[in-house]
Image (spheres, grey):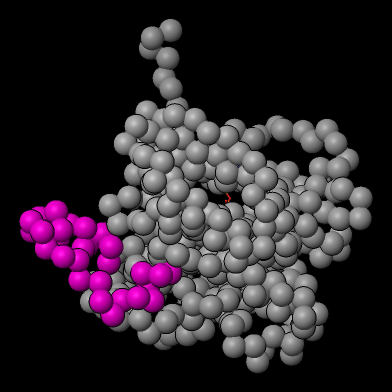
Amino acid sequence: MTDKKYKEIAELGEFGLIDHLTEGIKLKHKSTIHGVGDDAAVLNYGNKMLVVTTDLLLEGIHFNLIYTPLKHLGYKAVVVNLSDVYSMNAIPKQITVSIGVSGKFAVDHLDELYEGIKLACEVYNVDLVGGDTSSSLTGLVISITALGEATKNKFTLRSTAKKNDIICVTGNLGAAYMGLQLLEREKEVFKSTKGAQPNLEGYDYILQRQLKPEARKDIIELLNDINVIPTSMIDISDGLSSEMLHICKNSDVGCKIFQNKIPIDLNTEKMAREFNIEPLIAALNGGEDYELLFTVNVTDFEKIKNQPLIHPIGHIISKENGTVFITESGHSIELQAQGWNPLKKK
Ligand code: ADP
Ligand code: MG
């Protein structure tokens, strides 16, 4: 048995692993409308749909306590879950919070963490209704589950985009990634130059986008006000390219996205230039923006076209025509989830 060849997890990658582990799961209950595969599960509870989503955050993998204040961490841990609820076009109502705590933490530290958690609950109007607490061998573990409500004909999946739909993105992209680059750089300077104070002045916007992101509650309210139900939606946690490909794969369609339509903030652009990173790369592949990516029927275009927070960036095409990115100079490139760098090809 010792010569059995095990399959490496890296061969599958995160999404491949999830597909592999959840393959063959059969849903037993009529109330389970959608299980694994979207930002949240959708459950039918009478007049309302319940959506459920959970996230796991590990010290050293998802956050670094050297530059992440615990209050911000608590706030962000809640927000990333609420973002998954909003991306179903649902309203979050409750969360549970589970933590694993190693010996290096004192009560005061956890108080700080919970200050952030409670603040997010106030800001987003959700109730903290339970959780679990354990010790941990290797640092801080935070797992949050969020529950939300949607009306029956209004929840939005990743799998329902249709040919000719307009692809929209909210806010701007790449800022959180540039915030992370800045924090990582200053951490290195701090480590190598004894006592050097981090130079973070003038970078408030990208730092806030990384350390204290917000979920797009406002957009869900806006879409409701202007009477638009997206045909599909996902939140942008892993970068625009990756999320766009999720929608295309799950909806069995292709897409055409235009470089000159991708919203990038001036602060992001400035920081990217300083780092010699093409701002577009940060926007396409940088994660943690927690903006929403959605599609709307062309008949709804009039309603969204003058909304300052919503940017049409392209449209859905048939699967046979591929997932296409049109550069500023008019070249057509295949959209790729990672490691794609058009500048390198030149
Ligand atoms: P998101 O980035 O929106 O949080 P993920 O990529 O983490 O979504 O997950 C995609 C889907 O796979 C979700 O439906 C999630 O609930 C499900 N999922 C992730 N990990 C597991 C797991 N270990 N077992 C079962 N389902 C999982
Ligand atoms: Mg998501």
Q: In terms of secondary structure, what is the magenta stretch mainly? A: helix
Could you tell whether 43 is left or right of 239 in the image?
A: right
> Along the line of sight, which residue is nearer the eye, 247 or 272?
272
Q: Position of residue 78 (x, y in %)?
A: 55, 55
Q: Is residue 48 magenta?
A: no
Could you tell whether 327 is left or right of 143 in the image?
A: left
Residue at image point 72% right, 56% down: 93
Q: Which residue extends farthest left?
A: 194
> Along the line of sight, which residue is nearer the eye, 204 or 71?
71
> Along the line of sight, which residue is nearer the eye, 92 or 160?
92
Query: 16 above or below 346?
Result: above
Q: Give the range drawn in magenta.
A: 182-209
Could you tell whether 265 is left or right of 192 in the image?
A: right
Residue at image point 41% right, 49% down: 62
Query: 279 above or below 158?
Result: below
Could you tell whether 272 is left or right of 159 in the image?
A: left
Q: Which residue extends farthest top?
A: 1
Q: Does the magenta stretch include residue 187?
A: yes
Q: Position of residue 124 (x, y in %)?
A: 63, 64
Residue 317 image-quadrant placement: bottom right
> Along the line of sight, which residue is nearer the eye, 199 or 339?
199
Residue at image point 49% right, 55% down: 115
